[in-house]
Amino acid sequence: MNVPALEFKGVSKTFGGFRAVSDVSVSLGRREILAVIGPNGAGKSTLLNLGSGALKPSAGDVLHEGSSVAGRPAYRLVNRGIARSFQITSIFPRMSVGENVRIALMARRGYCRRFLWPAHRLLNDEIDGLLAQVRMQDARERLAGELAAGDRKRLEFAIALAGAPSVILLDEPTAGMSSDERALVVDVLKEVNARLGLSILFTEHDIDMVFALAQRIVVLHQGQLIAEGSPEAVRADPKVREVYLGKGHHA
């Protein structure tokens, strides 16, 4: 049986009297790139937070490779192989690109507890390999805080990959980028999906980016799933065009 990499089974999340996600069932296949789209307030980020352990579902279940992970803290899900990247990048701006990746690798290996080790000598080959995965090997010595938006996001991808994940959850991965930066990020994500077999679940408002990257699309509206399928099927769906793409959107 082909067990999904990540599965949401009838998940709901309520905040007070507001139901942000309502009985949503979605599965992310192994090696699949799946987009979750919808208007503002549709429940997209909430769904990612349920998948990464940042939130516990009010109802339903979340499964990683067939095992329930609902309610487990985020750090445990990272150790299981679920990585999360947020809309606002999380890096150490006063450190170099390479040192950012080194810290992520050291944390993964438990080396951060070994204070007397000469950290600058550790894991250099692996740092180079991870930076090559995101096409940043030439930026290793640059200060992270001086990077452009697209470069910061690719550095964050490298940091996430340091944990050797099987699943990565991305919230608006191309927010604030130029068209050239968006195109490069799309290429990098396609490459890590193909080369590493990484399963990718992402939210995105840039519909052109969605159709350039996603193999399958899920559409949320007011916390409910209203459509899912191939990019072509979703683009042609009358309800999706009405509530999200707009009647004037053309294929």
Image (cartoon, rainbow, N blue to C red):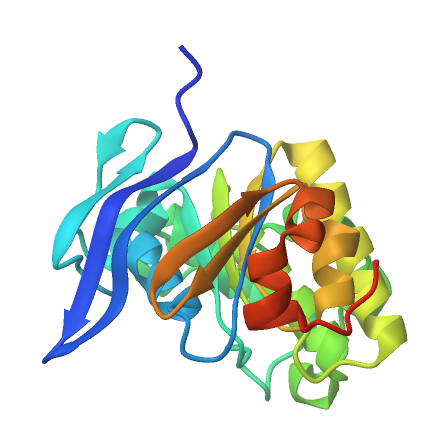
In the depicted structure, whether residue 212 falls above or below residue 7: below
The percent coordinates of residue 216 (x first, y second) are 62, 42
Residue 33 seen in render: yes
The percent coordinates of residue 50 (x first, y second) are 29, 58
Question: Which residue sits furthest right?
Answer: 180
Near-viewer residue (238 or 231) = 238
Q: Which quadrant, please, contains the N terminus?
A: top left
In the depicted structure, whether residue 4 falls above or below residue 209: above
Which quarter of the figure has residue 52? bottom left
Near-viewer residue (184 or 108) = 184
The percent coordinates of residue 250 (x first, y second) are 83, 64
Q: Residue at x 65, y 79 (%)?
A: 175
Which quarter of the figure has residue 232? top right
Residue 134 seen in render: no
Q: Residue at x 22, y 64 (%)?
A: 55
Q: Residue at x 59, y 50 (%)?
A: 123
Q: Which quadrant, please, contains the C terminus?
A: bottom right
